[in-house]
Amino acid sequence: MTEVRMMRSKMRHYINTGTTATPVWSLLNKGVGTLTTNFNPEVENDSGIADESKSKYTTGLAPETSFDMNVVRGNLANDKIFGICWARSIGSDAEFEFLTVDLGATPTGTAPNQAWPAQTETVNEAYNSRGDEAVKPLKIGVTLGHIGDVINGTFIPATATFTAT
């Protein structure tokens, strides 16, 4: 088996800039130089009275995705995220669908309609900061709190279509 390093550019993220009924999957890219999802596992330690070491079990996850974003007007994903910050939206007004696509995996189908493994979930935007140094692009700090369970499926980039499996 040949080993291939997966480049960061092969893990793509989209946000729904349309509606739940009619999604418009917009690539989250412009102005975003780094993006990390922390899964924040909840771990329980367990041991019996005859054990000499503890066992650890993951009992839950509390994922969140964090990034800084330069504001780029006219980009649908960027405009949606900045719009939530600008309006100071909270609660359900700051929720949207977040899609992660693994372009490093083996697709199904044939080009141009190849389908790649994907996961979608609802997130809630927390805008942590807005601003930056003089003569630099305006930047906002964002944390997306993941809500509920992930939905596995496939995504066809050519048609921007997600299908749950």
Image (cartoon, rainbow, N blue to C red):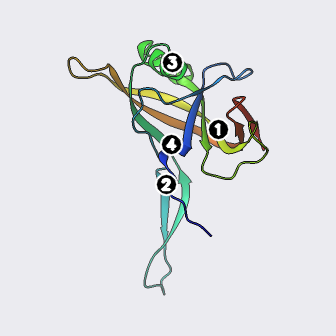
Within 10 angstroms of label 3, few (less than 14), some, or many (20 or more) residues?
Answer: some
* Side of 87 where 114 appears, left or right: right
The residue at 61%/45% (across/down) is 103
Q: Position of residue 7 (x, y in %)?
A: 49, 49
Regarding mark 2 in the picture, which secondary structure is present there?
Answer: strand
Q: Are marks 1 and 3 in contact (CB under 8 Å)?
A: no
Compute the Cα span from label 1 to label 3: 21 Å
Q: Residue placed at 45% from the left, 14% from the top?
A: 73
Residue 25, quarter of picture: top right
Q: Nearer the viewer, mark 1 or mark 4?
A: 4
Q: Which residue is mark 3?
A: 75
**3D distance between C-alphas at marks 1 and 2:** 19 Å
Which one is earlier in the sequence, the residue at label 1 or at label 3? 3
Q: Which mark is residue 120?
A: 1
In the picture provided, is 2 more to the left or to the right than 39?
right
Q: Amino acid at mark 2?
A: Pro
Residue type, numbered disc 1: Thr
Q: Earlier in the sequence, mark 1 or mark 2?
A: 2
> On the image, numbered disc 2 is attached to which residue?
41
| Near-viewer residue (85 or 32) | 32
Residue 131 appears in the picture as rendered: yes
